[in-house]
Image (spheres, grey):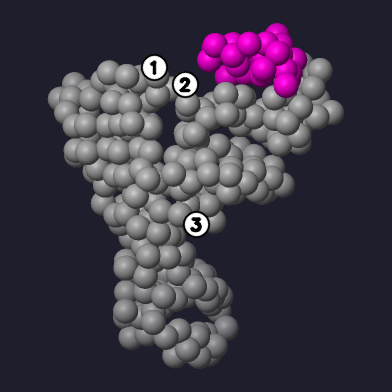
Amino acid sequence: MNAVISVENLQKSYAGHRVVDGISLTIRRGECYGLLGPNGAGKTTTLRLMLGLIDPDAGQLSLLGHAVPRHARAARLRIGVVPQMDNLDPDFTVAENLLVYGRYFGMQDAEIEARIPQLLEFANLTSKRDAKVPTLSGGMKRRLTLARALVNDPDIIFLDEPTTGLDPQARHLIWQRLRELTAQGKTLLLTTHFMDEAERLCHRLAILDQGRMIAQDTPRGLIAQHIEPQVVEVFGEGVPAWAQANAAKYSQRFEVSGETAFCYVSDAQPLVEHLGSHAELRFLHRPANLEDVFIKLTGREMRE
């Protein structure tokens, strides 16, 4: 399988509360693997355990053949990290941020300087080489954080919600760069709240909830296993009354959330024809997606 990350029965508790509860997974070289879950599902704690930043209560974990946390330092020399929040040094220029970060890996200045033009081109920041960090836009800072994670030419890159807060143009550019990395044989471990991002980028993914892995497969595999193939979203003030009287007749399963009814069906044609005679209602007919799976498995309620 050419596995570069191996996790078996990983467990971690805080104050008697099990935050990571028996997670097992294997990630192959050149794979983008996603960790999805609501707030508090255990995603960030799992990443911190994998990086050896905290010790597990039980379980076995290895990165690139190194046992973690015992040999986490050796493993981290071959790993890049894009944290959830940018932690760039505001007193340094773009190039200086890369130079100083490379020194943490024991790299010589000449070696880092030789890599900087390539990294800046990769991040579309060549013209900003000498700019101070506070002058950069949010998208530029995020791209610089990604470039910084690559300064040591890592085999594995951990990305914790890498596109949160970015505009669509910046998100699409980062997606393109992440695809380039997997094409080069890099392994990506991605956490995200954007289901379209996971569906586009991840070869496989796991859904976590309350510290447990509740599903794992390819995006298409999860959709095929857990959800009806088509969805009709019905909107309008009269939706609750309409759904109570009609939704069960035309769908295998339905949910009402506010003024929207989500009708899950194998054949949407009868429902679409029925809705055509209700001018007071609006509807959207679409294929099922990863967000539908996520909502079905973890629920619609807000998580704090």
Label pair 1/2, CB-CB below 8 angstroms: yes
Q: Amino acid under label 2?
A: Leu
Is residue 39 among the parts visible in the rendering? no
Query: Tag 2, which secondary structure?
Result: loop
Per the rendered image, the range of residues in magenta is 87-114
- Viewer-nearest of labels 2 and 3? 2
Q: Which residue is at 73% across, 31% downward?
A: 118
Q: Is residue 137 above or below residue 278?
A: above
| Left or right of 48 on screen, residue 260 | right
The quadrant the C terminus occupies is top left
Callout 1: 10 Å neighbours few (<14), some, many (20+)?
Answer: some
Q: Which mark is residue 297?
A: none
Question: In terms of depth relative to the viewer, which is nearer, 254 or 100?
Answer: 100
Residue that carries the numbered disc 1 in the rendered image:
73
Q: Is residue 60 left or right of residue 239?
A: left
Residue holding disc 3: 199
x then y, percent, for residue 50? 34, 29
Q: In this rendered view, identify the residue nearer to me: 210 or 274.
A: 210
Rendered image: mark on residue 77 = 2
> Is 244 rendered above or below residue 102?
below
Residue 249 is at least partly visible in this image: yes
List x then y, in percent, for residue 185. 53, 44
Q: Quadrant of residue 92?
A: top right
Q: Earlier in the sequence, mark 2 or mark 3?
A: 2
Q: Residue at x 47, y 89 (%)?
A: 269
For the residue marked with disc 1, what is the amino acid? Arg
Nearer-the-camera pick, 213 or 111: 111
- Mark 2 → mark 3, Cα distance in angstroms: 30 Å
Amino acid type of the residue tagged 3 in the rendering: Glu
